[in-house]
Amino acid sequence: MARSRAVSGERTRGFVAWVNSPRVGGVLLVAVVLGCAAGAFHTYLENVALRDRGVVVTGEVVEVHQTSSRYEDSYVVVRFEDRSGVERRVSVSNYLWSPTPKIGDTPTVVYDPRNPKGDIADTRMGPDWFATWACVVGGLVAAALFWPTWTGRLDWNR
């Protein structure tokens, strides 16, 4: 019985040591870099679409969803008519919450005619470049930490 515990403990220590090794840390940092690059690319394309081919329309707020008084989790549903005359009801999370929106408000929004449900913003806010820059900075930090982690010069266990 005592022998099986020792072997089990050795295995656990070996697994923990492997998970905390510089190689695993380096691989995780590469995954973070790739994820940040994909996020930056995606948000950049959405922002460019709004900037270059966005259509400005006046809509009407039909729903207001403010969650636990945190604006970044809140959104409004805006109803508007697109260029082809189709009425759209779209969730807008990139919305200026000052003053607090009310049902019946008539905001001016900009939307991408190729993706009217997914790419829309309050014109007072414009495209969300912060998300793009946050992904870029996060990716650069992870890239800068990769080599010191991979070579063992940066020990995350201390």
Image (tube, rainbow, N blue to C red):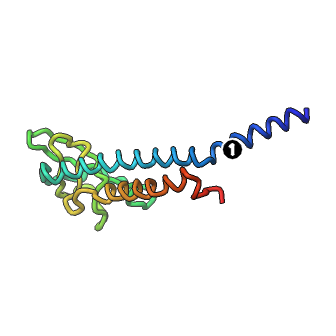
Quarter of the image that includes the N terminus: top right
71 sits left or right of 120 in the view = right
Q: Residue furthest right?
A: 1
Task: Give whichever of 62, 135 is nearer the camera.
Answer: 135
Residue shown at 13%/43% (left/top)? 82
Residue shown at 80%/40% (left/top)? 9
Residue shown at 23%/56% (left/top)? 127
Task: Give whichever of 24, 100 is nearer the camera.
Answer: 24
Residue 124 showing in the rendered view = yes
54 sits left or right of 133 in the view = left
Quarter of the image that includes the C terminus: bottom right
Where is residue 66? Give x, y as percent: 38, 56
Task: Give whichever of 79, 132 is nearer the camera.
Answer: 132
* Amino acid, disc 1: Val
23 sits left or right of 73 in the view = right
Q: Residue furthest bottom?
A: 99
Where is residue 23? Give x, y as percent: 57, 45
Q: Crowding near pointer 1: few (<14 within 10 Å), some, many (20+)?
A: few
Where is residue 132? Give x, y as percent: 31, 55
Report which residue position mark 1 lands on.
Answer: 16
